[in-house]
Image (spheres, rainbow, N blue to C red):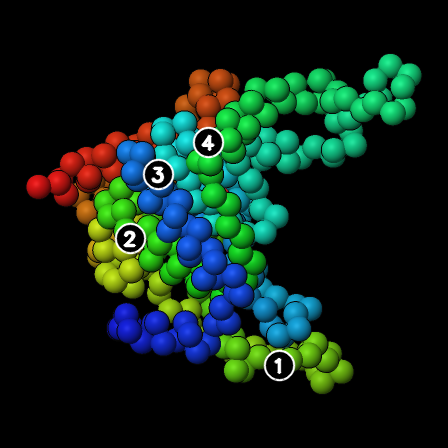
Amino acid sequence: MAEPRVSSIDGKLAEEFAAPSQVDEVRERMTAFARLHAEAGRCVVLITSGGTKVPLESRTVRFLDNFSSGRRGAQSAEYFLDAGYAVVFLHRHRSLYPYARTFSSINVLDALQFSGGDQDRVVVNPQVLPNIAKVLKKYQEVTASQLLLPVEFSTLSDYLHLLKASAQALSSIGSKAMFYLAAAVSDFYIPACDMPEHKIQSSNGPLQLSLKMVPKILSPLVIDWAPRAFVISFKLETDAAILLEKARQALDTYRHQVVVANVLDSRRGHVVVVTPTSQHEVVLSKEDVDNQVEIEEKIVTNLTAAHKHFIGQQVG
Ligand code: 9Z3
């Protein structure tokens, strides 16, 4: 199917996807953040993370969701910060968050205890949270130096408008901007004008849904909104046999710099970094697993090197 033209995507966004109320204010904050860090000589990465929600009713009781825990995005954010980047973290509300993700499976009440017999003093149980001091130190350093700007989305509409706003904000720093699009984004939606206001009634019988195709946001991002940026998209499949073909198709269609291709079941231990001229497997060895190395560390090392090379090519 022919790709919709960029201008028609702008119109569609305005007409069919309700913009979140804070979008202008968030755009201003992201613009100031990008300028501040670029002036200090830093690159800025916009990470998208988590799955989008597609409501079936405007007063939403039911919705379709795209699967993503947010682990890839949250872990990558930490490695980009270690690499000296400033990070805009555009994530699904309540998905995994940098640093806090280390403790995501722990019930906070299991991690606390009274100090001695004193029921007015609560302290951390070091057996439940052995690394808490180390992680807290890192988190506080990052927060104090304002290197991490969190922005939340829930619905597909929020995501599309906030991604556009972030692209406009980061375009002012040219090739120093990186887009790392790890969020799991719905391909289907119900336009605001076709959506029932109230809860769909089961007394009306079986539900038939007709969903429209979501406009491909990568086209205007690459061509129009942030044309000098370094752009990485993720390709997710469940059938390994079609993964690389789909990744190359995406590069051919959108003409951006990198696709990170992964299969749902093996995504923690194996990805392929695909560019128009290369294909590089990133794998965790048994030794890596034993040493608790995370694949995001290797992905980020690969991509920050490629970004550096890209910036070098743009100068002069
Ligand atoms: C990914 O492929 C991410 O690696 C995962 C990470 C969502 C699999 P987790 O959050 O998982 O760590 O649990 N993201 C992109 C998914 C996506 O929707 N890609 C679209 C596609 O493949 C293009 S935007 O067609």
Callout 3 touching callout 2 (CB < 8 Å): no
> Element type at marker 4?
loop
Which percent across, then down, holds residue 138?
52, 25
Disc 3 or 2, which lies upstream in sequence?
Answer: 3
Label 2 sits on residue: 171
Q: Nearer the viewer, residue 311 or 145?
A: 145
Q: Is the residue 314 above or below the residue 139 in the image?
A: below
Q: Is the residue 188 above or below the residue 279 in the image?
A: below
> Label 1: how many residues lie within 10 Å, few (<14), some (14-19) or many (20+)?
some
Q: Nearer the viewer, residue 225 or 68?
A: 225
What type is the residue that disc 3 sits on?
His
Q: What residue is at 87 percent from the left and 14 percent from the top?
A: 116
> Label 4: how many residues lie within 10 Å, few (<14), some (14-19) or many (20+)?
few
Label 4 sits on residue: 145
Label 3 sits on residue: 37
> Element type at marker 1?
loop
List the single residue furthest toward the top. Answer: 116
